[in-house]
């Protein structure tokens, strides 16, 4: 009592956990998804993930050194950026384009704003948005899953030289003699032909798509483990998925032959990966309890609107980037009332 009582703001009991431990745990959660991507698409997927992660790490090191911050690789955040970026790209995406995406994602999406903790948008999605605009043909060229010989040879477009026309993937696919392969993802087939892939195939990962988006079940398991470790706010992915399902439901009820079912919406495309590992970005998402729910519902519903009525097959990338941009405003609008004051004050 002689020294007095020091009163601080709550919470008074805090969980001792470092940034690098959080990031390492997220990397561990992503590893099974990366392993399944390599199993599904072979050597090309492995080289894609190594390229995006390696270039992202080099870019982080370069700009940290340039700004006098020293080596910032120890926090593991850039590894997450590299892995997530690689998982969102087609498995046969030319490696030089993947390197450009990684460089732009870290340089413009992270380093430009001051590094970890200051980025306003998810860096991996910034990089992907850039190559979506710069290389629209390459980023919408898909290859079949579980192709024979995938561990013995690369997808022809993988080693395309910079600024050269990618090697024709169609000829390579034709040589595989795969019956029924159309070169389109389940999302594209549903959007333009109104035919849904079997939900079991979409949920388990027996389909084509970006390297790490195919198995909704595996992503869900890894995301739930991450939430159980308390390394993400579970309300964000749940709100994203709920927003997507609620937005898709009335259209499906009105015309089930034209619009996709809510469970197809949840299990197809990059929605599951984005909900658990991108929308939940601790830096770019709101910080209030009500704010994260509004943020998640906005992303989920906007994703479905873009899918159904936009020119793009997938919309979750732009939905999250717009959600990131609105994050500070959502946090400001949903600030709780200070105890003992009126709402206006």
Image (spheres, helix red, strand yellow):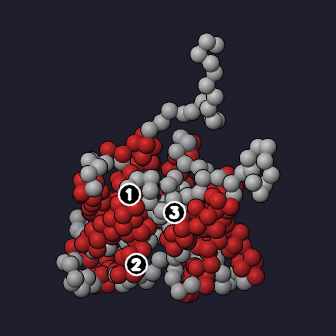
Residue 132: assigned label: 2
**Which residue bears the numbered disc 1?**
114
Question: Residue 20 bears which disc, if any?
Answer: none
Coordinates of residue 116 in the picture (x, y in percent): 40, 53
Q: Indicate the quadrant where residue 212 lies.
A: bottom left
Q: How many marks?
A: 3
Q: Is residue 167 above or below residue 216?
A: below
Residue in the foreground of this view, choosing between 10 and 138: 10
- Where is residue 261 shown, x and y percent of the image? 66, 73
**Which residue is identified by label 3?**
274
Where's residue 36, x and y in %?
40, 57
> Which quarter of the picture shows residue 194?
bottom right
How packed mark 3 is, by other alpha carbons closer than 10 Å (few <14, some 14-19, many 20 or more), is many
Q: Nearer the viewer, mark 2 or mark 1?
A: 1
Q: Position of residue 203 (x, y in %)?
A: 55, 63
Q: Residues within 10 Å of mark 2 (few under 14, many from 20)?
A: some
């Amino acid at each position: 009592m002689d020294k007095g009582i020091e009163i601080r703001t709550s919470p008074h009991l805090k969980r001792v956990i470092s940034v690098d431990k959080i990031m390492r745990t997220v990397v561990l959660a992503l590893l099974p998804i990366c392993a399944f991507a390599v199993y599904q698409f072979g050597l090309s997927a492995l080289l894609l993930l190594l390229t995006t992660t390696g270039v992202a790490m080099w870019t982080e090191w370069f700009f940290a050194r340039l700004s006098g911050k020293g080596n910032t690789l120890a926090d593991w955040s850039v590894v997450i950026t590299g892995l997530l970026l690689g998982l969102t790209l087609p498995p046969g995406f030319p490696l030089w384009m993947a390197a450009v995406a990684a460089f732009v994602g870290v340089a413009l999406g992270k380093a430009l704003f001051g590094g970890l903790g200051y980025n306003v948008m998810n860096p991996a999605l910034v990089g992907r948005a850039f190559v979506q605009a710069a290389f629209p043909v390459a980023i919408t060229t898909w290859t079949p899953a579980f192709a024979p010989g995938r561990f013995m040879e690369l997808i022809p477009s993988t080693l395309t030289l910079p600024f050269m026309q990618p090697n024709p993937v169609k000829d390579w696919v034709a040589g595989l003699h795969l019956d029924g392969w159309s070169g389109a993802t389940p999302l594209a087939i549903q959007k333009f032909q109104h035919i849904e892939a079997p939900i079991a195939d979409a949920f388990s990962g027996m389909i084509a798509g970006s390297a790490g988006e195919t198995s909704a079940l595996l992503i869900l398991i890894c995301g739930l483990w991450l939430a159980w470790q308390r390394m993400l706010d579970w309300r964000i992915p749940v709100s994203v998925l709920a927003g997507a399902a609620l937005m898709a439901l009335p259209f499906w009820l009105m015309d089930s032959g034209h619009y996709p079912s809510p469970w197809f919406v949840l299990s197809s495309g990059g929605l599951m990966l984005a909900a658990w590992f991108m929308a939940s970005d601790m830096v770019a998402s709101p910080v209030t309890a009500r704010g994260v729910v509004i943020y998640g519902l906005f992303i989920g519903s906007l994703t479905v609107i873009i899918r159904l009525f936009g020119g793009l097959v997938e919309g979750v990338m732009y939905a999250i980037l717009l959600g990131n941009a609105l994050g500070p405003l959502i946090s400001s609008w949903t600030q709780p009332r200070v105890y003992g004051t009126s709402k206006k004050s």
